[in-house]
Amino acid sequence: MVLASASPRRRELLARLCAPFEVVPSDIDEILEGAPSETTVAALALAKARAVARRVGDGIVLGADTVVVIDGVALGKPLDDADARAMLRRLRGRAHDVITGVAVVDAATGRAETAAAVTRVTMADVGDDALEAYVASAEPLDKAGAYAIQGRGAALVAGFSGSYSNVVGLPLGATARLLGRFGVAVSAPAED
């Protein structure tokens, strides 16, 4: 089992489903081909998994990609504090979708399957001081949409509908089902 991601959050989430696994980041450009959708995000996850499958040659490879979508625009990881601040202001007091694409590739045979999960997140209408304090924490800098629901960013979230683990970066239910179809023994996720 190989995780094609450098994300510590994905590593922690996957460890809830199965162990042991190796981590081999894909190092591909994370560029969506087309408008952000379940299909395009799953295709990017598949590109990551296939890139790693070619390098490792054997084993089951799991790739994933998460985007935050508001007004039809994908918000990836912010470039800097100013970008994080702009993203958070855009999200403030509004609902958006978090889409995670998941792909599994059998490196030996090339067999591949994908899935995607969508969670609707509503952000609280917090003031500028709260946003500035959050940006100053540096937590937003490596997170899609510039927030971490599992960290300090939880204070910015008014609520959500769907999979919590999807917002963190790996929808456990969808991932467990995909891995199971490839013969990987998985624990039932405690929550999704």
Image: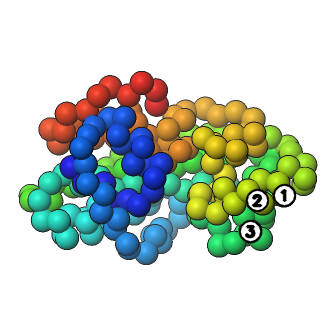
In this rendering, would 17 be left or right of 1? right
The numbered mark at residue 81 is 3
Specify the farthest residue to the left: 109
Badge 2 crowding class, 10 Å Cα cut-off, few under 14, some 14 to 19, many 20 or more, is many
> Does label 1 or label 3 sit earlier along the sequence?
3
**Residue at 40% across / 36% down in the picture?**
172
User: Would you say residue 70 is visible in this rendering?
Assistant: yes
Mark 3 element type: helix
Q: Position of residue 148 (x, y in %)?
A: 63, 48
Q: Give whichever of 123, 21 is nearer the camera.
A: 21
Q: How many marks?
A: 3
Q: Which residue is mark 2?
A: 135
In this rendering, would 139 be left or right of 62? right
Q: Give whichever of 141, 33 is nearer the camera.
A: 141
Mark 1 element type: helix
> Does label 2 or label 3 sit earlier along the sequence?
3
**Residue at 26% across / 54% down in the picture?**
22
CA distance separating discs 2 and 3: 6 Å
- Image-quadrant location for residue 2: bottom left
CA distance separating discs 2 and 1: 5 Å
Badge 3 crowding class, 10 Å Cα cut-off, few under 14, some 14 to 19, many 20 or more, is some
Q: Give whichever of 50, 18 is nearer the camera.
A: 18
Q: Give whichever of 34, 47 is nearer the camera.
A: 47
Q: Which residue is mark 1?
A: 132
